[in-house]
Image: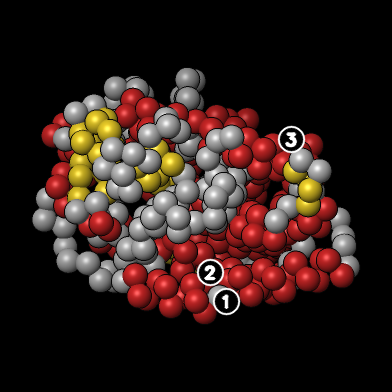
Amino acid sequence: MTTQHPPVESWNTDFDHTDPQWVADPFPIWDELRQRCPVAHSGRYGGTWLPVRHEDVAAVAYDTEHFTSRSVVVSEMRPGPDDLPAPIGLAPPITSDPPFHALARRLLLPAFSPKPIAALEPFTRELCIELLDATAGRTEIDAAVDYAQHIPLRVIVGMLGFPQEDADIFRRFIRMVLEDVDQTPEERQALIEEGELDAYMDERIAEHLAHPRDDLTTYLLEAELDGNKLAPEHVRGTMVLLMIAGIDTTWSAIGASLWHLAQHPDDRRRLATEPDLMPVAMEEFLRAYAPVTMARLVAEDFDFNGHPMKEGDWLLLPFPAANRDPAFFADADQVVLDREENRHAAFGLGIHRCLGSNLARMELRVALEEWMRRYPDFELSDPESVTWSAGQVRGPRTVPVRILPSR
């Protein structure tokens, strides 16, 4: 990815999460900051803070008094107190603050509880097998492009009751929201004013109002809060949240796990010969390669551990950095497949902990199980051509692998 910003000069005073060095490998940056400046500051994006220790990330995540979730994606468009619909936010419940947040979250919990997610497993497994069947006979495969990126995309499309052929539209929306954040405010505003995303969602809503069906969109349209149907912007915003947060995050986790296995033959062979290890190994992949960095806005001027934060400042909440903190995890920089104690923050901390964690875990487990069953031995065919996404969801966009002969 190219960036419109100049290169970073100093990570503790000028960091940028879209900088090519960060995109390629942020782990050394976080390690350095923990030693030098555990809460960094940058003037970019109008002023942004970055805690990298687990204790500081957790403190912010649990503090809903001094930090608001009205906007959770850092960009050049920094919203003021009156720029976003309260109390809903743009994508409830993740952009909602208490007390409304609890109501909006509780509304979605039944759809993401273990029973309905278990019912999606056969479809997910059939999908993985179908994708792998399409690679039959090839010795060179892109584990991201040919496999990982399709799985959560088609699962979420199915849950929402949208046409499966709209996958490419979803990919474009995801890039616009999560990756093109270094565009100027004018460029971002022009994209918003085009209204393509809202228009697409409104079209799907109209279809479901005319022809209700057994899917998540109809569920939202028929749901009530305090005896009232959800506001149109609430329905649309939650659908956008599910599309954005439920797709890129999981395909990034699947891709990163396969990227790791392609480089570590001992781990690969162990998973191939010890399939019962998969649930524990999966949690370690989530810890080591957590994809999501969330964001907050400072709600009011206050001092955070000696750092004078101002109302409206951005704050990046890097759960991946928290997961690599050696003060919280032994051998934090190592992938330990059978790590026994693993209280990772891959799904976040605090009130906004990911409500789709059951779904993400199921998709990751099934994707890895089916891949390892089909291709137990593989390696990166061109390590230099692996590319990573920029922005607040980090995962490999290309993972070219060579399938090795069975031993």
Report the side of 347 relative to 303 (left or right). Answer: right
Q: Quadrant of residue 35?
A: top left
Query: Do we see residue 230 in this rendering?
Result: yes
**Residue situated in front as seen by the camera: 107 or 181:** 107
Say which element carries label 2.
helix
Mark 2: amino acid: Phe
Q: Is residue 291 above or below residue 9?
A: above
Q: Residues within 10 Å of mark 1 (few under 14, many from 20)?
A: few
Mark 1 vs 3: CB contact within 8 A: no
Q: Which residue is mark 1?
A: 196
Residue at x-position 86% and y-position 55%: 214
Tell me the quadrant of the picture where the N terminus can be found. Answer: bottom left
| C-alpha gap between disc 1 and disc 2 | 9 Å
Q: Which of the marked residues, 1 or 2, is nearer the chain's N terminus?
A: 2
Sequence order check, earlier mark of 2 and 3: 3
- Label 3: which residue? 114
Query: At which x and y percent is residue 76?
Result: 32, 63
Residue at image position (40%, 64%) is 179
